[in-house]
Amino acid sequence: MGIGFSASLALHLAEEDQEEQERAARDVRWHRRRTVRSRRYPAHRVYRPRQSYLGMTEEQCLESLRLSREAVTELCHLLNRDLQTQSTISTALPVAVKVTTALNFYALGSFQASTGNICSVSQFAVHRSITEVTDALFCRADNFISFPTDQQQQQQRATHFYRSAGFPRVQGAIDCMHVAIRAPVHDAMAYMNHKGYYSINVQLVCDHQYRIMQVNAHFPGSSHSAFILRHSSVPALFEGEGRLEGWLLGDKEYPLQPWLMTPLRCPQTEAERRYNKAHSKTWITVEHTIRILKQRFRCLDRSRGALQYSPHKVSKMIIACCILHNFALQRGLNFEEERDEDCMAEQEAESDDEEPLEEPTVQQGRQVQQALILDAFE
């Protein structure tokens, strides 16, 4: 009888559990009917025809996507494996629409609505397209952003930089830029920069052709430029075995290093003034690079509003824009820098007011700097 009673009890409990689940399901359905707007779809839904770069002229592509039709086609082929949908439904977005949507967002601003109108897709589709294209580009960063260390490339960079203002052995120019973001959910004050808005402080190193050779977009806006440099991969390129021959040029925000030449704060002699003048004319290459990058991809420019994404996603977008910048330069798509007063004023205002952090190797840097002045500018 004990076994029969146990079986009966188990059956009774199972029936009660099933009734409870059915009751909960009925409550959920009732709640949805009361709170969720009912959507009545017609028997045969009509979708708007999706737009892509294939329906644009060459001029429209350059204006709205910042790339030529041929370059966009090449980009679609490059990202096809990552963007090709696995769905069999007829309404899935093709690769050309996804790439067009993301490029238009990068090029024109920080809000998705206008991009959705241009491509005739919903904001959700815009969001998914931007995320997929950004992730696909981010995975290929090493293929487009690199610091060549072979002797031929080093000599070529040094020669071209020397021709601009007579500053010898320059391997690149370094600076930081701020990209505005919305207030983060976690640790928001770390992203508040010295100008009073939330941002990511992005370190860039460029060559004489405005090509970005190194980018670090992982530090919040309150981080000092010297701090970002110290925790980046750049020092390792100039220290230890196999180091680069020469130096980078940085502005007064950076501490003087044996491999990082900065301007003299109070030049006393004619040679020191010539050094500062040549330094300024050569280092300004990175300022031009930042202006071109922000004018080519307006989503990075604060004049179009802050990016409405998490810091992690914005970091990926910044690197994706740097990849596309180099991608365009490789194909001869040079972007003519516009004289945008607002952009120039913002770039000048982004300089930190703090003194550079003093480091033990500063004294060695002073010795190298004085020897350089005596050798090349005396």
Image (tube, rainbow, N blue to C red):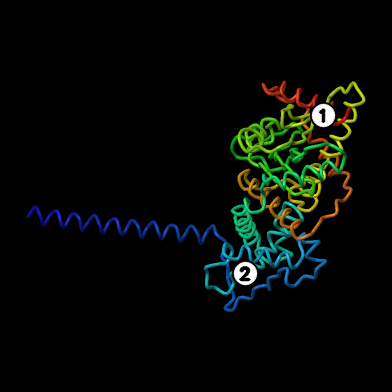
Could you tell me which quadrant the C terminus lies in? top right
Q: Decide: few, some or many residues near mark 1? Use Cα within 10 Å; few <14, some 14-19, many ≥20.
A: many
Q: Quadrant of residue 343?
A: top right
Q: In the image, what residue type sits under mark 2?
A: Pro
Give the residue at the far right of this rendering. Answer: 270
Place of residue 110 in the rendered image (x, y in percent of width and height, measured from the top left):
72, 51
From what the image shows, is residue 239 above or below residue 43? above
Q: Quadrant of residue 191?
A: top right
Residue 187: assigned label: none
Q: Quadrant of residue 349?
A: top right
Place of residue 101 in the rendered image (x, y in percent of width and height, measured from the top left):
69, 62
Question: Distance between the Cα atoms at labels 2 and 1?
Answer: 51 Å
Residue at (74% x, 53% y) in the render: 325
Give the residue at the far left of this rendering. Answer: 1
Q: Which residue is mark 1?
A: 263
Instruction: Provide the secondary structure element on which disc 2 rests.
Output: loop
Q: Decide: few, some or many residues near mark 2? Use Cα within 10 Å; few <14, some 14-19, many ≥20.
A: some
Residue at (66% x, 40% y) in the render: 183
Q: In the image, what residue type sits under mark 1?
A: Pro
Q: Nearer the viewer, mark 2 or mark 1?
A: 1
From what the image shows, is residue 268 above or below residue 232? above
**Dot placed on the residue nearer the N-terminal end, 2 or 1:** 2
Residue at (61% x, 54% y) in the render: 140
Q: Which residue is mark 2?
A: 94
Q: Is residue 281 left or right of residue 217?
A: right
Place of residue 211 in the rendered image (x, y in percent of width and height, measured from the top left):
75, 49
Give the residue at the far bottom of this rendering. Answer: 44
Place of residue 15 in the rendered image (x, y in percent of width and height, measured from the top left):
26, 59
From what the image shows, is residue 25 above or below residue 155? below
